[in-house]
Amino acid sequence: MGDYRGNRAALFDGIEEGGIRAASSYSSHEIDEHDNDNALDGLQDRVSILKRGNDMDASRGILSGTMDRFKML
């Protein structure tokens, strides 16, 4: 069970890092469309994984904490 929660936390870290990378790439006028598409696909994969485990109490706690962080940005 501990491993499962650790993996989910790592998924969220990846989403946040991806979001930060995407935001910083907008300042440079040369956005690589291919990289952007790949990043979006990866994000959608992660979201579907998270939605599948959404009914678990552990994931709900992690999800709500992450959503609060996103709202503050």
Image (spheres, rainbow, N blue to C red):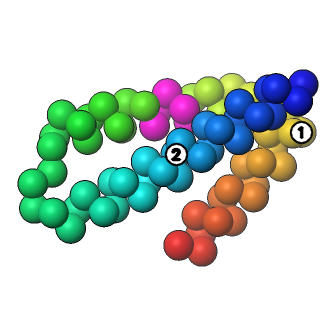
* Foreground label between 1 and 2: 2
Residue 45 lies in the magenta-colored region = yes
SS assignment at label 1: helix
Q: Seen in the image, is 22 located left or right of residue 18?
A: left
- 65 vs 62: above or below: below
Q: Residues within 10 Å of mark 2 (few under 14, many from 20)?
A: some
Instruction: Name the quadrant containing residue 55.
Output: top right
Instruction: Name the quadrant containing residue 3.
Output: top right
Residue at position x 61%, y 37% from top?
11
Residue at position x 81%, y 44% from top?
60
Q: Seen in the image, is 65 located left or right of residue 2?
A: left
Residue 56 lies in the magenta-colored region = no
Q: Which residue is mark 2?
A: 15
Q: Is residue 43 visible?
A: yes
Do tag 1 and tag 2 residues touch (Cβ < 8 Å)? Answer: no
Q: Which residue is mark 1?
A: 57
Q: Seen in the image, is 4 located left or right of residue 16?
A: right
Q: Position of residue 61 (x, y in %)?
A: 83, 49
Secondary structure, magenta segment, majority class:
helix
The residue segment tinted magenta is 43-47
Q: Position of residue 28 (x, y in %)?
A: 15, 63
- Identify the mark nearer the N-term, 1 or 2: 2
Residue at position x 71%, y 30% from top?
7
